[in-house]
Image (cartoon, rainbow, N blue to C red):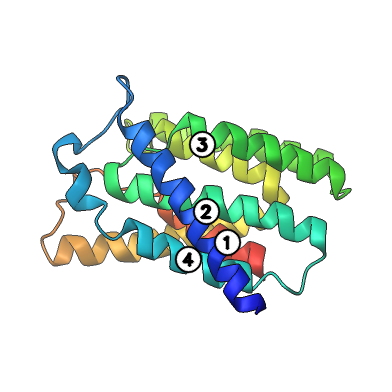
Amino acid sequence: MQIFFIFFIAIFFSFIGSRWIDFLYKLPDAPLTFPEEIESRARFRKPLLTIILFVCILSLQKFSVPTIFYLTAAIFFLALIIFTDFEQYVIFDKILFPFAIIGVAAMIHLNLPIADRIIAAIFGGGIFFILSILSGGGIGGGDIKLVAVLGLWLGTEKLLNVVLISCIFAGICAGILILTKKKARKDFFAYGPYFAMTTIFILLS
């Protein structure tokens, strides 16, 4: 019975999340990379989003009720970021902002070390801002803000782990795409999904 309830929750949030993404794509100022391919690039979004949410929420049963609430919210926002960045190479501020607000609420409500998380957000975002300048824009503004928000959720140690694992993971995937000639060295590469996927793994563990 519990599994069916969790599956229903996953379907519900998948529907809400997918509709939200569609709404964001239709905004006049939406910085879409492939505006003519919205439907084709999103054709597997709903079933994959449902599966991700179902598996992740099912894995949260070992935590307390307040923690389950906050982690479910985090996974929901991270999943949306995975899809928008894979589909259109964009991470929307309208997703990051509530993600950050709930992160602050979780920090306070769950009595997590506030100073450590604020430091992680400032230094994480600051370092990626510098890397963006040095790389000539190779790292997008969405990635910078995402890392800063992740600092609020993870703290310094876990954020460092996420960045290291994500960069290795993304580097391997980028290398495979270049070797298979699906991407050139100068092509833009979305790092957000790798940060998001690694964060989900860290949160669940």
Lateral position of residue 123 relative to residue 143, left or right = right
Which badge, 3 or 4, comes first in the chain's sequence? 4
Quadrant of the rendered structure where residue 46 is? bottom left
Residue carrying label 1 = 9
Question: Seen from this angle, which residue lies furthest top?
Answer: 28
Which badge, 1 or 4, comes first in the chain's sequence? 1
Quarter that holds the N terminus? bottom right
3 or 2: mark nearer the eye: 2
Which badge, 3 or 1, comes first in the chain's sequence? 1
Residue carrying label 3 = 95
Look at the numbered disc 2 and give the secondary structure of its residue: helix
Identify which residue, 11 or 154, lies in the foreground: 11
Q: Alpha-carbon distance for marks 3 and 2?
A: 14 Å
Q: Few, some or many C-alpha atoms within 10 Å of disc 3 (few <14, some 14-19, many ≥20)?
A: some
Give the amino acid at mark 3: Ile
Quadrant of the rendered structure where residue 108 is? top right
Look at the numbered disc 1 and give the secondary structure of its residue: helix
Quarter that holds the C terminus? bottom right
Give the amino acid at mark 1: Ile
Q: Alpha-carbon distance for marks 2 and 4?
A: 11 Å
Residue carrying label 2 = 13
Give the amino acid at mark 2: Phe
Instruction: Assess whether mark 2 and mark 3 are in contact (beta carbons under 8 angstroms).
Output: no
1 or 4: mark nearer the eye: 1
Is residue 94 positioned above or below 173 on the image? Answer: above
Instruction: Assess whether mark 4 and mark 2 are in contact (beta carbons under 8 angstroms).
Output: no
Q: Alpha-carbon distance for marks 3 and 4?
A: 18 Å
Residue carrying label 4 = 52
